[in-house]
Image (cartoon, helix red, strand yellow):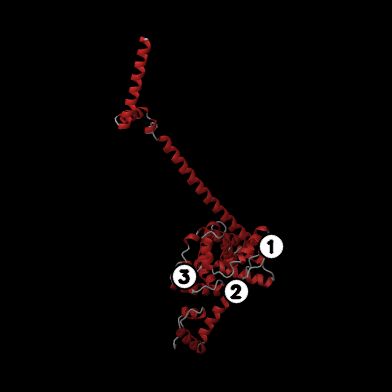
């Protein structure tokens, strides 16, 4: 590195941002060049000045910082709970409105076993079965016997 | 290392044992846990980065009271934005970027109304101990406050936060070359201003 490097490059060297080979060349140049060493020293003075600025965060300030963050977290949680509650309330309200808006339905049909007409037809259907015919025949025979007994009693 | 600060009140007492349980976890994991609802993890991030950001805020703004507010708003903003944190940069860079935005917002809100760099520097002076150090601190703060916003930011990020050019570029969302040129100009300006103060 015969000619002086760019000041940006000196700054990059100072900040440890130069690649290894460039940094090596820079060191060699600085060993020979007083002007570039002065530039480097100037950078050091700025760093030194800024390093002397102290601004320690006091314990109470740190506490306030934690407290503020905690408040924000709790507020955030509260907002979340509110949003969930609001969403649940909206769903409930919408469902209720939908139910109210539906037309009133007829009562559902009674099951077959509670329907009297069906029960009758069921019995009449049974009459045509052999068991039904037998039962009815037996019933009719009993009725005929009763009637003849009555006639006999009257004639007596 | 986290020290017990039980004298600071019951709230802090509740945090400290839990913060200690996260001791070996890196920043990114803490941010992930915090995003998942672990508030203690976020408090540990505050513990790790609070002092560093506060020092930067004081230098950017020039007074301790407003710097404290800005740092508080930085962490509150970071907490709200946790879900958006994509780890494209480090947590340190991400937090620094938020602080810079908050500081810029503060400047827009307040500095427009009442300018005067030395006024802010005087506020910092009250926090110092030895008079000589205070005077020097006042001069440096005054010089800092007289730098342009962009130059001050880049200078402080490099000199106080020890951030690399790449990290600064990420935090400010500018190309690396811009960082280098701004840093160079900021240093040159700072040297001139300190010369004017006889330092």
Q: Nearer the viewer, residue A25 or B39?
A: B39
Sequence-wise first label, 3 or 1: 1
Question: What whole-number distance in Å separates the C-alpha atoms at marks 2 and 3?
Answer: 22 Å
* Residue bearing the label numbered 1: B6
Figure quadrant of residue B138: bottom right
Percent of width and height locating residue B6: 69, 62
* Residue bearing the label numbered 3: B169
**Residue extending farthest top:** A155
Percent of width and height locating residue B7: 70, 62
Which mark is drawn over residue A51? 2
Would you call the spot at circle 1 few (<14 residues within 10 Å), some (14-19), or many (20 or more)?
A: few
* Callout in the foreground (3, 1): 1
A3 on left or right of A51: left
Q: Which of A25 and B81 is in front in this view?
A: B81
Q: What element carries label 2?
A: helix
Q: How many marks?
A: 3
Question: What whole-number distance in Å separates the C-alpha atoms at marks 3 and 1?
Answer: 40 Å
Q: Image height check: is A60 above or below A51?
A: above
Percent of width and height locating residue A16: 50, 79
Q: What element carries label 3?
A: helix
Percent of width and height locating residue B23: 59, 69
Q: Which residue is drawn at 65% across and 58% down?
A: B11
Kindly tell me whether residue B55 is visible in this rendering.
no
Q: Nearer the viewer, residue B50 or A50?
A: B50
Kindly tell me whether residue A28 is visible in this rendering.
yes
Evaluate if marks 1 and 2 touch, with contact meaning CB atoms under 8 Å apart. no
Quadrant of the drawing holding the C terminus of chain B: bottom right
Same chain, marks 3 and 1?
yes
B40 on left or right of B164: right
Q: What chain does mark 3 sit on?
A: B
Q: What chain does mark 2 sit on?
A: A
């Amino acid at each position: 590195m015969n000619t002086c490097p760019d000041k940006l490059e000196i700054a990059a060297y100072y900040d440890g941002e130069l690649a290894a080979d460039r940094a090596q060349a820079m060191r060699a140049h600085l060993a020979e060049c007083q002007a570039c060493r002065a530039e480097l020293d100037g950078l050091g003075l700025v760093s030194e000045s800024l390093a002397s600025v102290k601004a320690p965060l006091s314990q109470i300030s740190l506490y306030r910082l934690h407290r503020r963050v905690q408040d924000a977290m709790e507020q955030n949680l509260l907002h979340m709970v509110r949003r969930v509650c609001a969403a649940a309330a909206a769903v409930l309200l919408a469902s209720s409105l939908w139910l109210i808006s539906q037309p009133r339905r007829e009562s559902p049909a009674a099951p077959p076993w509670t329907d009297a007409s069906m029960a009758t037809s069921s019995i009449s259907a049974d009459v045509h079965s052999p068991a039904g015919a037998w039962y009815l025949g037996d019933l009719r025979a009993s009725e005929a016997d009763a009637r003849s007994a009555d006639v006999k009693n009257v004639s007596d | 290392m986290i020290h017990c600060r039980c004298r600071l009140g019951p709230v802090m007492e509740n945090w400290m044992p839990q913060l200690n349980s996260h001791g070996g976890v890196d920043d990114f994991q803490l941010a992930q846990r915090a995003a998942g609802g672990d508030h203690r993890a976020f408090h540990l991030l505050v513990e790790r980065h609070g002092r560093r950001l506060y020092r930067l805020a004081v230098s950017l703004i020039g007074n301790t009271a407003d710097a404290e507010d800005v740092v508080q708003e930085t962490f509150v903003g970071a907490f709200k934005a946790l879900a958006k944190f994509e780890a494209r940069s480090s947590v340190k860079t991400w937090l620094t970027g938020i602080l810079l935005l908050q500081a810029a917002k503060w400047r827009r809100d307040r500095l427009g109304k009442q300018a005067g760099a030395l006024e802010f520097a005087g506020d910092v002076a009250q926090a110092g101990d030895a008079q000589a150090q205070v005077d020097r601190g006042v001069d440096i703060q005054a010089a800092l406050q007289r730098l342009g916003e962009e130059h001050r930011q880049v200078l402080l990020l490099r000199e106080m936060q020890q951030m690399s050019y790449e990290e600064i570029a990420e935090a400010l969302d500018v190309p690396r070359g811009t960082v280098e040129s701004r840093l160079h100009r900021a240093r040159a300006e700072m040297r001139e201003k300190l010369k004017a103060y006889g330092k």
